[in-house]
Image: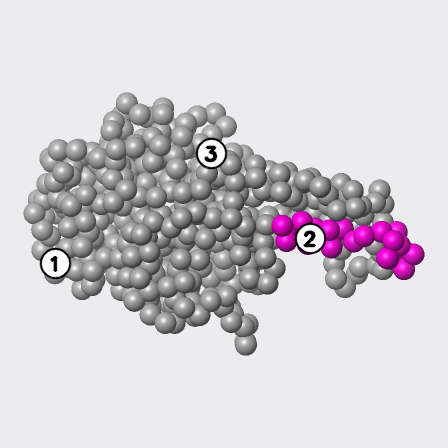
Amino acid sequence: MKLPIQKSQAFIHDLWETRIIPALMDYIRIPNQSPAFDPEWETNGHMDQAVRLVHDWCRHHGPKDMSTQIVCCAHRTPVVLLEIPGQLDGTVLMYGHLDKQPPLAESRWRAGLGPQKPVREGDRLYGRGVVDDGYAVFTSLAALLLLREHGIAHPRCLVLIECSEESGSPDLAYYVEKLREKIGTPDLVVCLDSSCGNYEQFWLTTSLRGMVGGVLTVAVLEEGVHSGDAGGIVPSSFRIARSVLERIEDQNTGQLRSEFQVEIPDRCLREAEVIAKALGPDSFSRFPFVPGMKSVVEDVFVGIINRTWKPALEIIGAAGLPDAFTAGNLLRPQTALKLSLRIPPSLDAGMASRKLKEILETDPPYGARISYQEEWDVSGWRAQPFSPWLHGAVQEASNAFFGKPAVYYGEGFSIPFMATLAASFPKAQFIVTGAMGPHANAHGPNEFLHIEMAKKITLCIAEVLARPLF
């Protein structure tokens, strides 16, 4: 049964404006950083405060026949589980998370904004965690409230909200297994923690890159020595680090060697052509380039392939390098670089991590002491092709509430929880979507939620849930 468009839009607008946005503002004020960034999260109590806020809101505003619980286990972040009985066959699992990235210094936020300072400017609600991913639980429940408002049948739905996603979801697999009997076997999993290419269409993520990373350390001396005395005799640890990195990445083009490449499926190439048309020629302008700077590629199609199916290396941290304004004239004993290597969705992360270590450590120049300490390996994810009913549902929903067709979209970042959910529910269909569009800046300063986009996503999810799952 289809939703009445104008009545549905009015209901969701009122729900967001009067009940959801005030709750999101309260959520923004809570500094509940993920455990990787707040080791004292248990004693600080911020995570419990965020969980209680969401749980109490759901109990107060949710359907009367909904059951709610906070599930806690020692030394693990809690989860919130909602169960809403349905009238149609099948089960839907809806996912979100409450933990946040670090706030960053207030000075890095625009004047008048701050990580724990909720500010609304037109369609934008600013604050840390609001788009990544505080809105997800409210969107999930709002979609079901809309169906109940119009007496439209829906399947049994569960909403699972975790609190360790920004730390790599180390607790999610444990809770999925613990709650397996209650969850059952979902036919559809809806994840509201991804991105959108614009705010004018319904975007469905169909692939995610994997990621491997760790610390490369190059040591040449037991202690630092005068650079004038040793220069030309003792090789620079930084130069050696550059040379071993050149083994995996061409410094002129950024291309990675063949062991980290895969054959790109034809379906994904066709998707990229559609995405390029939807985004237009200025799609890379969202990046804050310094004046005169150019992107690696100018062709939008090539850029989309690069960020979704090609590997990319980034140095995300360094040690052994004194501050540029206080450094002495010293030949430093060692250099350490933290590497983050994005890998294609279908490349095995464990294999890639082992290969990276082998390449970096083998045959060290000058006999330098080189070590690579592996810190993480997360495989990517690829969605199975949508079944006919799901493809039809998302296209009709997008056309109804956006006035444009839905776009299937490969994403460049990594979401570790997707591997957990895909492995736990291998027969389920997946809708992976989100409101993290241009300039939303999740993880960075000036993070915001595009409110009108969130409302339309709510409407589209409701429209999909109003359909039989088969």
Q: Nearer the viewer, mark 2 or mark 1?
A: 2
Instruction: Return the x and y of residue 98 as percentages of the image width and height.
Output: 40, 43
Tell me which amino acid carries mark 2.
Ser
Locate residue 227 relative to residue 258 in the image: left or right.
right
The image quadrant of residue 395 is bottom left
**Relative depth, front residue between 201 and 231:** 231
Task: Say which residue label 1 marks.
Answer: 5
Secondary structure of the residue carrying tag 3 is loop
Kind of residue indicated by mark 1 = Ile
Measured in 3D between alpha carbons, the distance from the residue under mark 2 to the one under mark 1, in whole angstroms, is 60 Å
Q: Residue at x 83, y 54 (%)?
A: 331
Q: Residues within 10 Å of mark 1 (few under 14, many from 20)?
A: few
Inspect this view and state whether residue 222 appears.
Answer: yes
Disc 2 packing (10 Å; few <14; some 14–19; many ≥20): some
Residue holding disc 3: 170
* Residue topped by disc 2: 243
Indicate the secondary structure of the residue bearing disc 2. Answer: helix
Q: Write the start and end of the magenta stretch as one range.
A: 225-247
**Earlier along the polypeptide chain: callout 3 or callout 1?**
1
Name the residue at 40% across, 48% down: 263
Q: Tell me where residue 416 appears, x and y as whole percent.
A: 43, 40
Q: Quadrant of the C terminus?
A: top left
Which residue occupies 55% across, 59% down?
Answer: 254
* Kind of residue at badge 3: Pro
